[in-house]
Amino acid sequence: MSTFLFQAFVYLTAAVIAVPVAKRLGLGSVLGYLIAGIVIGPLIGLVGAETRDIQHFAEFGVVMMLFLVGLELEPRSLWAMRHRLIGLGGLQVGMTTTAIGAAAFAMGQPWSVALAIGLVFSLSSTAIVLQTLNEKGLMKSDGGQAGFSVLLFQDIAVIPMLALIPLLALPELVELLSHSADHAGGHGEQISLIDGLPGWQVAIVTLLAVATVVVGGHYLSRPLFRFIATAKLREVFTAAALLLVIGIALLMTLVGLSPALGTFLAGVVLANSEFRHELESDIDPFKGLLLGLFFITVGAGINFVALIDGFGTIIALTLGLMLVKGLVLLSLSFVFKLGGSDRWLFALGLAQAGEFGFVLLSFTVQNGVIPQAVSETLLLVVALSMLLTPLVFICFDRLILPRINARQSREADMIDEKGTVIIAGTGRFGQIVNRMLRGNGYETVVLDLSAETVSLMSVFGIKAFYGDASRPDLLHAAGLAEARMLVVAIDDKERTVEIVKHARRDRPDIHIVARAHDRTQVYSLYAAGANDIIRETFDSAVRAGRSALEGFGIHPYEAEKIATAFVAGDQRMIRDMADAYDPDILPHENQEWVKKAREYSEATGVAMAGVRNPDRSAIDRAWMPPGKRPEEEPG
Amino acid sequence: MRKVLVLFAHPAHRHSVVNNAMGKVAQGLDNVTFADLYGEYPRMKIDIDREQVRLAEHDALVFQFPLMWYSTPSILKEWQDLVLEYGYAYGEGGDRLKDMPFLPVVSAGGPQTAYHPDGFNNFDLRTFLAPLEQTANLCKMRFMPPFVLFGALKAPGDTRLETHLGAYRDLLIALRDETFDFDKTSEMDELAHDRLPIRKGARR
């Protein structure tokens, strides 16, 4: 017990210290975890050999991550991805395997070993890439989607690889293994539903399992979740969500399919379900922790002694590997028409070897395909390439993106319209603003993070550009320097504030209309310098309230007056509170703000207690016949 | 028979006794359309096309309103500003309302004696309604003397309200059934329960 507590303590401490520091330095969480692992493992030796076991456990984070990715992806979007999934993914795995295999063969490895090495290195790290893309908000970008297609294909490809690799066994290694097999026996015993079944039955069982996931996910999950939700116990719902993921992973393992693939499929099936967000928020913390643990173990598992012994070779091999993988991806990006920054994101992002590399390497050693000594070196190459990936992403951010964006604005090709209005975000909110402005003759430049939305808008002849508007360079490329107005219509709270701050700093004279998520954000946006701050649901909520009043038989004009008075009162309060708000002090620590908040909540309480609501006086006074006073009126 | 359109404007139903009761009278009559403008356009966004279609479907127009600051409530002014377009109600080709009877139905807070050159309000009620009268003239409508309830705030207390409601009913029916005697209105300043030029028996 105390060992377990100590280990948990060490891992958590490392993560809690390293990750925020790495984030603050702009290195991303993945590199933070990896560094934390290196520190507690090879550097100060707090954790040792058990990391390998923990790693197998932590790999489940990848399964959860694919479930979450599936939840974000409706069946329709998956179907739309099919060409990329099979074409791009298949070509990537095939070409990389060939290129790496040929290189290994040229370095004097037997063809079977060379092929196995090629297969191992054709895979990329789903964990690192997806985590980083999510963190950077690039998941929905064209490059991100292409990368995801390839990763998904790789996940599927692992299964035939596991079937193929034993066929590549070297006779002398098998001989060696059979001697030691006795004392290692009983270790790899696994339950399976398909052992000893003829091929056609295997196919039927496999199809049945997939059908269970799809049909069950579609028809059974909703009543089941609804039933669980009625218990109103959050932890039970969390347990059910975990059960779902683990159950599907188990089922897939039993029939010899990839658990990640199975949960991904389940996620897609549930993407339209009303429980999607609940599932997401339940699974997300587990995924985050497990992935973090996984990254730590990768860092901790690096054998520094071996690394230093063969330092030159290993570095050369790692860089060579990433170069070859990157070149293959780059050539594919031309075939599949990925342009601009998407091309580089795709080529650099997937250039590492992945966590399945660890699995496959130990599998090859077990089956006598690759000699132990070679696999030690290869393990280091896999780990090192994963370690380098966050650095590659930083290069992408700092070196490549600015250059591409600079070129874009100079060529005036990507963003060839310097509109008088920049609209950041064209979801349900921005689209309406855009239509109103365009319909009345104002030129707009529209930025959005969803490649799908952007291409859809382009179909309708609207100038729309893909990109993260919180990146200053993109705002400039869109013409921030000349624009007369900026409408920030994205739904990401932090980014909205970032964009407003940046635009205000850059252009003290520009008119900024900003979409606020809630009341608190109104204060931050006010402090950030937005001119007009529009709460995204406030007006519709007021209209709903007005409809409700009309439903009670209140005259529409009276209901309108009430709504107007309510809006005025609320805006007065917000303005008053915004003056007291200080973005550098947490609201509840801001004495003046708290005092005002309390005053207002008391006023509401008084109104609810039956004393005349101050909002009502304007209504009651209106069109009062001569000789009467508001007090005489009933209610 | 005419179809009568009553455009009613009162911004504060909660304070209205007389006009609400009059509204009930109008609503209870066949071939009389009663339209609460503040109810239909609580945000004052009057639909011009819809209003012009509605006018075309009727043969007589009534404005029913309480006198506010010696004029109509604002939505009735808005209605005139928007609906009575050039080329539709007046000007070149603007003859759609030609010969349509136009009747203002007014409730006034002050007593009749106040609406006199020597009275508290210094002018006759007809003088205050001159803009409506000239608007009707420009649109070639047949302006009728206003049907007025003076001292409306105090009317609910005595029998005057009941009498007024009965007279309003008779007036609308006469307008509808074409038994209203337009010829006798030239010498009348106002219509009231005791001054209603209605011919006996249907003309048709």
Image (spheres, rainbow, N blue to C red):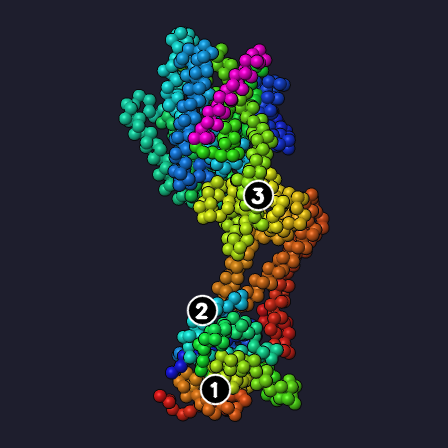
Q: Are marks 3 and 1 on the same chain?
A: no
Q: Amino acid at mark 1?
A: Ala
Residue bearing mark 2 = B50
> Nearer the N terminus, badge 1 or badge 2?
2
Q: Secondary structure at mark 2?
A: helix
Asked if residue A409 lies in the magenta stretch, the reply is no
Q: Which residues are magenta?
A: A308-335
In the image, residue A592 above or below residue B170: above
**Crowding at mark 3 (Cα within 10 Å: few <14, some 14-19, many 20+):** many
For marks 2 and 3, give the CA distance.
43 Å
- Residue at image position (57%, 46%) is A418
Q: In the displayed structure, does residue A268 sit left or right of residue A21?
A: left
Is A319 contained in the magenta span?
A: yes
Task: Kindly identify the residue that appears in the image at 56 percent across and 80 percent down.
Answer: B131
Number of residues whose C-alpha sits closer than 10 Å to that of mark 1, classed few (under 14), some (14–19) or many (20 or more): some
Q: CA distance from mark 3 to mark 1?
A: 70 Å
Q: What residue is shown with label 3?
A: A478
